[in-house]
Amino acid sequence: MILSNKPPYDITPKILALLAGISEKIGAINAHTLSKVNPELRKQNRIKTIQASLQIEGNSLSLEQVTAIINHKKIWGPEKDIQEVVNAHKVYQELSSFNPQSSRDFLKAHKLFMSALIEHPGKYRSKGVGIVNGNHLKHIAPPAKRVPELMKDLFLYLKNKDEIALIKSCVFHYELEFIHPFLDGNGRMGRLWQTLILMQEHPLFEYLPLETLIKENQETYYKTLALCDQKGNSTLFIEFMFEIIDEALSQILNSKSHTLKDTDRLDSFVEEAPAIFTRKDYMLKYKNISSATASRDLKKGVALKYFKSKGDKNKTIYVLK
């Protein structure tokens, strides 16, 4: 429901509690885990994301089959399902080049997603649509003639700097599903664009398994969208997606494969370090490591010629080369 460029929602105690937890986890991941995932793990996460997002929309291909397609191997399967995977892979390859505030990029992404699957991909619908579940009409989308105006308002909302990016991403996702601007592909576009909005604020979201967790909670996902339609605001959907985001961040924090090594910490630190710093400065960035670990890291940094050391023991200072 778009009202004066400000979609309606309420900030509940649950949203505030989840927001605090999410912010804390983001800080911990940025400080203590590897934000630049190795290429192989990045590829695996992306394949899982593509498979989960398409499976939500009814795609029948397994993770193994999706992996084979992305690795340019032939498989047996429905032609439409294979085409969906090929298209989605192209979209995610270009993900970081899209501007989340650009409606032009939004339409470009839809065109890539739906190429060879529907007529006029990358264009807003020109007819009315309704969402049917069995014999029941679940949702009647706004008239087609209102879609350009509603989507313009929604993209104006994304430019509102007073809004928290985490909340904007959820509101955009819900409002997109409500407007239903395309004849097909709305679900995958809503999930993709939420990830893109989050990535702009926190790059680590490119690697979070949001789509996989939504797939695992698919029934609740659709029920929450329907309840928001009934209530006329996106509050419940923000709560639902915050729970998904919180769980995804927890999985990253609990994964040993993302733990920073000493060289990872050093590489990250020297990118932003002042010309002269101390062990205390180093530990301000990595608050969960011990002083002994910090000393070992810095000794290794000197050995690797990242910087020079001057002084002795707790009076040592370090100078970037």
Image (cartoon, rainbow, N blue to C red):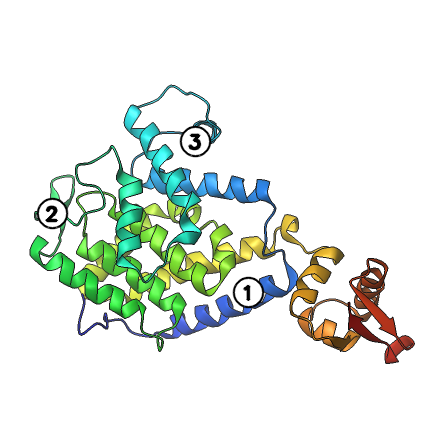
Whole-angstrom CA distance, mark 3 to mark 1, is 31 Å
* Eye-nearest disc, 1 or 2: 2
Determine the residue located farthest toward the right in the rendered image: 312
Q: Which mark is residue 25?
A: 1
Q: Quadrant of residue 169?
A: bottom left
Percent across and percent down for residue 46 are 47, 43
Sequence-wise, which precedes: disc 3 or disc 1? 1
Badge 2: residue crowd in 10 Å (few <14, some 14–19, many ≥20): some
Sequence-wise, which precedes: disc 2 or disc 3? 3
Front-most of residues 177 and 273: 273
Query: Which type of secondary structure does the marked residue at label 3 adopt?
Result: helix
Percent across and percent down for residue 236 are 30, 64
Q: Quadrant of residue 261?
A: bottom right
Percent across and percent down for residue 152 are 20, 63
Q: Give me the residue at 59% from left, 50% from top.
A: 37
Badge 3: residue crowd in 10 Å (few <14, some 14–19, many ≥20): many
Q: Give me the residue at 42% from left, 20% from top.
A: 74
Q: Give me the residue at 42% from left, 61% from top.
A: 198
Dividing the image into 4 quarters, which one contains the C terminus?
bottom right
Determine the residue located farthest toward the bottom in the rendered image: 315
Whole-angstrom CA distance, mark 1 to mark 2, is 40 Å
Q: Amino acid at mark 1?
A: Lys
Residue linked to disc 3: 66
Query: Which type of secondary structure does the marked residue at label 1 adopt?
Result: helix
Sequence-wise, which precedes: disc 1 or disc 2? 1
Dividing the image into 4 quarters, which one contains the N terminus?
bottom left
Query: Which type of secondary structure does the marked residue at label 2 adopt?
Result: loop
Residue linked to disc 2: 129
Whole-angstrom CA distance, mark 2 to mark 3, is 30 Å
Q: Which mark is residue 157?
A: none
Q: Quadrant of residue 112?
A: top left
